[in-house]
């Protein structure tokens, strides 16, 4: 098994200007903050980064900016999924030219034959190793027969899977076969690591990196009670965020932390002021003191009453 890319990666939120253009002025300090916290790298232009909603030139600008700012020893994983295999291959070649370490892709729309053909062509044509993106909630049409996922993982140049599902039996089958597996659901990182996942990629890593890193280090030391304690505290935050439109809520917290990621490319509305205030109040009530310290929302949104 090639574990050179194992570790924790933030699913990078793509910062946008008010007119929905990529905003490098926010992306650069945000990247530096995540890497200083201790993440092994970032995963860009995926579901969290709204890659499928971004224009191709914006996706290229995002990769170029982050690659230029990447510090030694840190890694860049680039989601290149696109509406056509031609675009996906172009993005993969661009990522390779700019020093990315691997590419990834959600499955295309279509039947099993179309999905198999897409991944076969992408794996063969990509200059970088390919990480499949298994996410049944987002792509319910794909891999209805899990055996196809296993077969595609056997293709040359397929490194492993970003596994966003709660089917830990299937996850363990992949790991047992020698695939590199990244846990995808933030709320189940400890469970994924227990089952053998070699790392994780997640959205809420952006807002509480130290909590995830503490969980990961405990798991690597087989200190499972500590890992579970961190997971429970993390899940208090996730449960609170899920009471609101999730990605707008995530952007609201990032803004309070000093990183204004702007509007969403999808067109989904950001939280109105009343909901933003309510979200911060709910976080006040629902999170532990340790997590409150990690969130450290600053003066405007300070968590003042952590339990």
Image: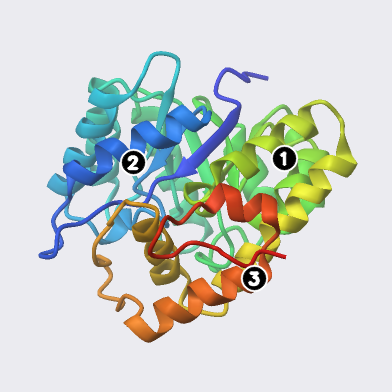
Asked if 231 appears above or below 222 in the picture, the reply is below
Answer few, some or many: residues within 10 Å of disc 2's Cα (few below 14, many 20 plus, some between 14 and 19). Answer: many
Q: Position of residue 57 (x, y in %)?
A: 13, 45
The CA distance from mark 3 to mark 1 is 18 Å
Q: Quadrant of residue 155?
A: top right
First in sequence: mark 3 vs mark 1:
1
Name the residue: 20% across, 31% down.
Answer: 64
First in sequence: mark 2 vs mark 3:
2
Q: Which residue is mark 2?
A: 30
In-image side of 106 versus 255 (left or right): right
Asked if 230 appears above or below 32 in the picture, the reply is below
Answer few, some or many: residues within 10 Å of disc 1's Cα (few below 14, many 20 plus, some between 14 and 19). Answer: many
Asked if 6 appears above or below 216 in the picture, the reply is above
Q: Which residue is mark 1?
A: 215
Checking the image for residue 147, the label placed there is none
Q: Position of residue 43 (x, y in %)?
A: 43, 40
Residue located farthest toward the bottom when viewing the structure as drawn: 274
| Mark 1: secondary structure | helix
Q: Quadrant of residue 209?
A: top right
Name the residue: 27% across, 25% down.
Answer: 69
Q: Is residue 14 visible?
A: yes
Checking the image for residue 239, the label placed there is 3
Q: Position of residue 269 (x, y in %)?
A: 30, 79
Asked if 58 appears above or below 54 in the picture, the reply is above
The CA distance from mark 2 to mark 3 is 24 Å
**170 vs 237, nearest the viewer:** 237
Answer few, some or many: residues within 10 Å of disc 3's Cα (few below 14, many 20 plus, some between 14 and 19). Answer: some
| Mark 3: secondary structure | helix
Name the residue: 40% across, 59% down.
Answer: 299
Name the residue: 48% across, 61% down.
Answer: 302
Scheme of colours in the image: rainbow
């Amino acid at each position: 098994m090639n574990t050179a890319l194992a570790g924790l990666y933030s699913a990078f939120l793509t910062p946008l200007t008010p007119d929905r253009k990529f905003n490098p002025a926010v992306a650069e300090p945000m990247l530096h903050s995540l890497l200083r916290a201790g993440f092994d790298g970032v995963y860009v232009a995926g579901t969290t980064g709204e890659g499928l909603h971004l224009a191709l030139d914006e996706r290229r600008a995002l990769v170029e900016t982050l690659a230029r700012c990447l510090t030694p020893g840190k890694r860049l994983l680039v989601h290149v999924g696109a509406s056509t295999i031609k675009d996906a291959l172009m993005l993969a070649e661009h990522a390779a030219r700019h020093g990315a370490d691997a590419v990834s892709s959600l499955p295309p729309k279509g039947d099993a034959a179309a999905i198999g053909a897409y991944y076969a062509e992408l794996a063969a044509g990509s200059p970088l190793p390919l990480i499949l993106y298994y996410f049944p909630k987002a792509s319910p049409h794909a891999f209805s027969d899990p055996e196809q996922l296993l077969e595609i993982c056997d293709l040359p140049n397929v490194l492993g899977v970003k596994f966003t599902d709660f089917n830990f039996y299937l996850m363990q089958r992949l790991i047992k076969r020698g695939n590199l597996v990244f846990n995808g659901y933030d709320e189940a990182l400890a469970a994924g690591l227990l089952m053998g996942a070699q790392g994780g990629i997640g959205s809420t890593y952006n807002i509480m990196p130290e909590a995830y890193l503490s969980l990961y280090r405990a798991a690597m030391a087989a200190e499972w009670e500590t890992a579970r304690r961190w997971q429970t505290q993390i899940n208090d935050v996730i449960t609170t965020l899920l009471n609101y439109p999730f990605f707008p809520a995530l952007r609201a917290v990032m803004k309070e932390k000093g990183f204004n990621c702007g509007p969403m490319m999808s067109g989904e509305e950001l939280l109105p002021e009343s909901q933003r205030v309510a979200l911060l109040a709910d976080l006040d009530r629902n999170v532990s003191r340790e997590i409150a310290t990690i969130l450290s929302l600053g003066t405007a949104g300070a968590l003042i009453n952590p339990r």
